[in-house]
Amino acid sequence: MAPDNLYYKVKNIFSPEKRQQMLELANKPGAFFDNSYGISFFKHPLQLDSLEINGPWQVQMLKQTVEESKIHKDKNRHNEFDDIYMPRATVINWPIQGKGYTVFYAEDKHACIGTVSYTNESGAILNTGGYNHNVILSSDQPRIVFQLCFDTNFERVKDFYEKDLSMRTY
């Protein structure tokens, strides 16, 4: 049985217009920086401030073109281009293009302990800093996700979502 703090499915909080703005930013030439995990980070997350999605988080977009990313556990870091702190303890993840699913693994990175799939109409709070995971691409189209990134634990982000974010639309 999967631990109950791997993921929590959430509704889409973005209008079609906001999602279109995200895609326009994502599709600009050179928007993403490739890393060793097989998932590229949006190079300049400060440019995402133009979306006006402000709160106690940092915003980020990711793009995946490889079939399967490396198994890894997220770590808080500094963005190399904008020199801003990028928390990665817990993220709320909304796909805006393409399809895929997240697989969580035991500490040994061999045993699968849970899987979550969600569509462009929903998202998920992911415990990316607490568990090893990877993403499997399940479409020919690159997968682009928009994230709210938090430097706090899964349960606090889940509570914050239920009490605040679930009632918002951007």
Image (tube, rainbow, N blue to C red):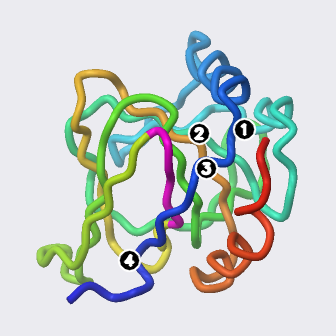
Q: Is residue 54 left or right of residue 118?
A: right
Residue tagged 2: 61
Comes first in the chain, label 3 or label 4: 4
Q: Are marks 2 and 3 in contact (CB under 8 Å)?
A: yes
**Mark drawn on residue 104:** none
Q: Does 34 appear above or below 74? A: above
Distance between the alpha carbons at the discs numbered 2 and 1: 8 Å
Identify the residue shown where x is 53% and y is 47%: 94
Compare residues 29 and 126 and report the one nearer the observer: 126
User: In the drawing, does residue 30 fall left or right of residue 139?
Assistant: right
Residue range (magenta): 120-125
Mark 3 neighbour density, 10 Å: few (under 14) some (14–19) many (20 or more): many
Quick check: is 74 in the magenta stretch? no
Which residue type does callout 4 highlight?
Tyr
| Sequence-earlier tag: 2 or 1 | 1
Q: Tell me the element at label 4.
A: loop
Q: Which residue is mark 1?
A: 45
Q: Disc 2 to disc 3, how far (Cα)?
A: 6 Å
Q: Are marks 2 and 1 in contact (CB under 8 Å)?
A: yes
For label 4, the residue is 131
Q: Label 4, label 1: how many angstroms apart (C-alpha)?
A: 24 Å
Q: Which residue is mark 3?
A: 147
Q: Nearer the viewer, mark 2 or mark 1?
A: 2
Could you tell me the amino acid type at mark 3? Gln
Are the residues at dot 4 and dot 1 in contact (C-beta closer than 8 Å)? no
